[in-house]
Amino acid sequence: MRIPILTYHDLDEASSPVSVSPAIFERHLIRLRTAGYRVVTLSEALARLGLDSPGKPLLAVMTFDDGYAAVHEVALPLLAAQGWRATVFAVTEYVGRPNRWPGQSPAVSEARLMDWSELRELSALGWEIGAHTRSHPDLRLLNDGDLSEETLGAKAVLEDRLGQPVRTFAYPYGSVDRRVRSQVRKIFHAACGTEMGIADEQSDRSVLERVDMWYFSHPGACDLLGTPLAGPYIRLCHLARRTGAWLRSPQRQDRLVRRILLNDRSEPTRAPTEQLGHRGGRAQTEKEVPPKR
Ligand SMILES: [Zn+2]
């Protein structure tokens, strides 16, 4: 059994390394539903991962790192309409504040993160709230005391404020080494990294692979979701991220999909904002964005 764990951050039109537009996000949901997927929380998916349950419904997990306010505004109503629940990884010291922690990329626009009442509302609706540290540091650089504060301390704050057990974690920037992983494994049932791949029974639950949905932010790429070409495309994205050389814009995603996977030499498709008639957003330009976090 394989479970795609999808990674999102903000849902906006900023075209930044953490942005997926609301129109494209809605398209992802349609593609998943059409392909027979049901979106469940990370803990629910992991509880079923070892069980033999052939056939549909297929399970997928949506994770939202950092806890942007757009998750409450955009994702919540769309997922609720399907009866689906997602997972948010919150940064406790930045709840209700702008995403301006030290180490934040200048390419990421300032945006508000959900406040405690919004997180409590999601939790009450069955969403899973996991920990994403207290202050979003690179955990590898911390001494043991600070590492404990950012992991065990973040779990304690979330459990106190939400009144729910916190079982899952996501590493800021995907930064993890043996010491950090060992600490996280003691505290959480499961933790997500940023390695591109699809989780299965063999996956290390202390560093689960995920699919960064930024790589599906062009219509050409997002229409691969739920098709046999999604796997090869995810492997190409994994290589692209390793080399750091490709796919730094949605337009390059489109070219890769059409020319390599679909062997199509026709003119590029239009940008998502034009194609979907999304109001209020500017058309995407071929803006280079830095490699992923
Ligand atoms: Zn983060």
Image: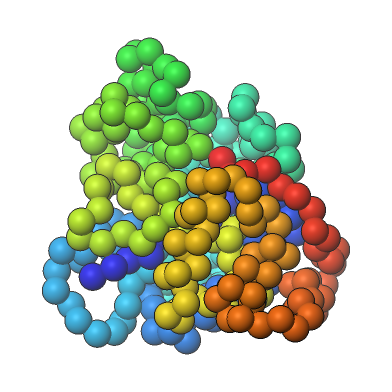
Q: Residue at x 85, y 63 (%)?
A: 282
Q: Is residue 208 above or below residue 221?
A: above
Total marks placed:
0
Q: Is 224 left, or right, of 286 in this rendering?
A: left
Residue 235 visible in the snapshot: yes
Q: Quadrant of residue 180?
A: top left
Quarter of the picture holding the C terminus: top right
Q: Is residue 255 above or below residue 108?
A: below
Q: Is 21 left, or right, of 257 in this rendering?
A: right
Residue 158 % position (x, y): 39, 37
Q: Residue at x 45, y 61 (%)?
A: 235
Q: Is residue 38 above or below residue 170?
A: below
Residue 123 % position (x, y): 41, 54
Q: Is 153 left, or right, of 173 in this rendering?
A: left
Q: Residue at x 31, y 59 (%)?
A: 199
Q: Is 275 left, or right, of 242 in this rendering?
A: right
Front-most of residues 136 and 94: 136
Front-most of residues 161 and 74: 74
Residue 30 % position (x, y): 54, 81
Q: How is the image coloured?
A: rainbow
Quarter of the picture holding the N terminus: bottom left
Q: Quadrant of residue 102?
A: top right
Q: Residue at x 64, y 65 (%)?
A: 253
Q: Quadrant of residue 20?
A: bottom right
Residue 121 visible in the snapshot: no
